[in-house]
Image (spheres, helix red, strand yellow):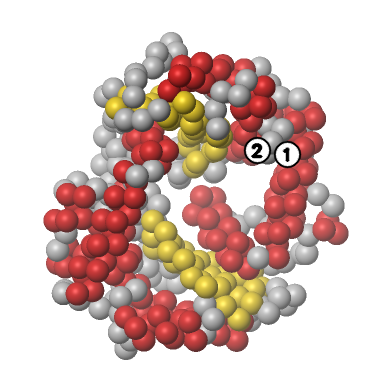
Amino acid sequence: MASSSVERRTVYTRQFDNGLVLLAEPTKAVESAAFTLLSPCGYSVDPADRLGLTSFLCDMAFRGAGPRDNRALVEDLENLGVERGESVSSAHTGFSAATLAASLDEALTIFADVVRRPHLEDGDQLEAARLVCLQEIGGVEDEPSQKLMDELRRRAYPEPWGRTGQGDEPGVTAATVDDVRAHWRRYYRPNGAILGVAGNIDWDRLVAHVEKLFADWKPVTVEDPIEQPAATDSPHTEFEGNQCHIGIAYPTAPYRDPQYLQAWAAVGALSDGMSSRLFTEVREKRGLCYTVNASLQTQLTRARVLCYAGTTAERAQETLDVTYAELVRLGAGIEQGELDRLKARIKSGMIMQQESTSSRSGSIARDWYHLGRVRSLEELGAEIDALTAKTINAYLEEHPPSDFIFATLGPTELVIPK
């Protein structure tokens, strides 16, 4: 990528004595500021009989915190013009917020209360949060494509890393306010937490404010989750109707692997855009399915390519066979024209990311978690420019798609390729 298209920026880093890492990328070209706070509380630490507890806690944390009750907290964030989001991944609960730069300090103060001083009260708020979680679980039952992909992840990743964020109905139903409070005390902690900030900010002022909010937060020592083998039961889930949902997964390079970009670009040729292989070969040429895609999903030490196809029951077996054949064919390599089209989309995305403080705050936090450092957009652009069909094909020759895992959902069981 030409250096003129990416503004040179400095990422500042400060690790506090309690383990909290603060990252910031200041830019004066915008009027906004955004932050992403990753708390080391993911669904992988849910107790086996309380699956969904991390998501339950995430919802409860915003139902009153610090000096604000539920209503006041929501109103104060709205009055600041904060656009916020929360998510639960295998390793983190993520809190994100974007606002005007002048409101950053106050927004950070509110979120410090959310993670450090949530009310977590029994009664109406607890039951309202439980209802939200149960509705999300019920929503999966009404969305067979998500149900299928949840099952594929359960088979593709070892336990507890193949779980779903929403958990299950027995776990959420059984959770008590004491469970929620104990989970918060144990896993909402500074050691392992990452705070990424981007936008029109002053680094010295930010450090002083974050130190005031978080420096006295006490670290907690926890053990890593105990891994168990992935599920090996039947790959087929019975589901009434005339549709069939197909999932295929295979291992690939995680984000921290030096070969990650080669693996990621190969998947891009497979499934990025209407000229990609899966769209062209499976949907356009043969008309086998109404949707087909693949994506590289990474955790810290492992990653999987997850492929999905939705089709009719009558065409399900052919769809499975053709999709699988395309995944195998990827091992033979890609063409330069496929990479050129992919690079054009990547660069457009990077320019938009450069203009989004929300996107950058999340990116720098993610980089630190996976790499222990932050790549500049200029560095990332140079790495993408260095990609060639030759380098990608060398990676594919050494690491062709293999060790496939399958999951199907529909009215009839399919023949799984050997």
Residue 280 appears in view: yes
Amino acid type of the residue tagged 1 in the rendering: Leu
Residue that label 1 marks: 342
Secondary structure of the residue carrying tag 1 is helix
Secondary structure of the residue carrying tag 2 is loop
Left or right: 9 with respect to 105? Answer: right
What residue is drawn where x is 51% and y is 16%? Answer: 318
Residue that label 2 marks: 272
Residue 46, percent from left and from top: 25, 52
Left or right: 328 with respect to 356? Answer: left
Query: In the picture shown, does residue 203 fall above or below 324?
Result: below
Query: In the picture shown, does residue 31 fall above or below 290?
Result: below
Q: First in sequence, mark 2 or 1: give its number.
A: 2
Front-most of 97 and 13? 97
Answer yes or no: do the residues labelled 2 and 1 have beta carbons within 8 Å? yes
What residue is drawn where x is 16% and y is 74%? Answer: 122
What residue is drawn where x is 59% and y is 66%? Answer: 358
Amino acid type of the residue tagged 2 in the rendering: Asp
Displayed quadrant of residue 274: top right
Front-most of 226 and 221? 226
Displayed quadrant of residue 183: bottom left
Residue 39, percent from left and from top: 39, 63
Residue 223 appears in view: no
Please tell me how crowded label 1 is: few (under 14), some (14-19), or many (20+) other residues with Cα within 10 Å: many
Left or right: 49 with respect to 247? Answer: left
Residue 32, percent from left and from top: 64, 77
Total of numbered circles in the picture?
Answer: 2
- Look at discs 2 and 1 and give the one toward the viewer: 2
Displayed quadrant of residue 282: top right
